[in-house]
Image (tube, rainbow, N blue to C red):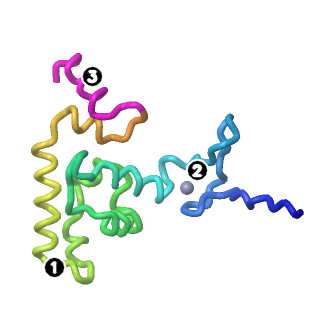
């Protein structure tokens, strides 16, 4: 009987940074937290979900394009998007740009401190913990 050992990747498929093995020896992760496009996309997609900051206009596909063009790297970039650049995209007409802007503005104007905190993707801080923190801080 031949034992086949799986080939364990050594570098992140997204940014090519060396992968880090956790102390448990089970999980591999990319240590390029700030600049890895796949991690940025994951964080921003999570933030934009309906149950989070609720920005349905920012689909994964649009986020990917914005990240590839270095237009967004964190959630704050979402709120200062260059709509002139977006309006130059193929198939992205003025109505699409307006819908995107409205979607982002609505999120900005309606998100509660609790939902904002829970949307950041901080380990262990979901909506319940965020609510406790905001209540304690009286925000
Ligand atoms: Zn990476």
In the image, taking residue 34 as reference, residue 79 lies left or right, namely left
Label 2, residues with CA under 10 Å away: few <14, some 14-19, many ≥20: many
**Disc 2 CB within 8 Å of nearest ligand 1 atom:** yes
In the image, taking residue 92 as reference, residue 3 lies left or right, namely right
Label 3 close to label 1 by CB (< 8 Å): no
In space, the residues marked 3 and 1 are separated at their CA atoms by 42 Å
Does residue 106 belong to the magenta stretch? no
Outermost residue to the bottom: 90
In space, the residues marked 2 and 3 are separated at their CA atoms by 30 Å
Measured as percent of width and height from the top left, residue 30 is found at 58, 50
**Residue receiving disc 3:** 133
- Where on the image, by quarter, is ligand 1? bottom right
Query: Which quarter shows the C terminus?
Result: top left
Outermost residue to the top: 136
Majority SS type along the magenta span? helix
Quadrant assignment, res 135? top left
Q: Earlier in the sequence, mark 1 or mark 2?
A: 2
| SS assignment at label 3 | helix
In space, the residues marked 1 and 2 are separated at their CA atoms by 37 Å
Quadrant assignment, res 101? bottom left
Label 2 close to label 3 by CB (< 8 Å): no
Label 1, residues with CA under 10 Å away: few <14, some 14-19, many ≥20: few
Rendered view: 135 above or below 89 = above
Measured as percent of width and height from the top left, residue 10 is found at 70, 56
Residue at image x 28%, y 64%? Answer: 59
Measured as percent of width and height from the top left, residue 68 is found at 41, 67
Region in magenta: 124-139
């Amino acid at each position: 009987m031949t034992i086949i050992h799986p080939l364990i990747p050594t570098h992140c498929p997204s940014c090519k940074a060396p992968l880090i093995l956790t102390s448990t020896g089970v999980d591999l992760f990319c240590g390029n937290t700030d600049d890895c496009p796949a991690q940025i996309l994951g964080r921003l997609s999570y933030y934009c979900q309906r149950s989070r900051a609720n920005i349905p206009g920012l689909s994964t596909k649009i986020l990917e394009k914005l990240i590839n063009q270095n237009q967004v790297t964190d959630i704050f970039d979402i709120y200062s998007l260059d709509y002139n650049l977006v309006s130059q995209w193929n198939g992205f007409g003025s109505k699409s740009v307006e819908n995107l802007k409205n979607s982002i503005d609505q999120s900005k104007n309606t998100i509660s401190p609790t939902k904002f905190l829970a949307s950041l993707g901080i380990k262990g801080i979901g909506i319940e913990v965020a609510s406790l923190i905001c209540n304690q801080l009286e925000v």
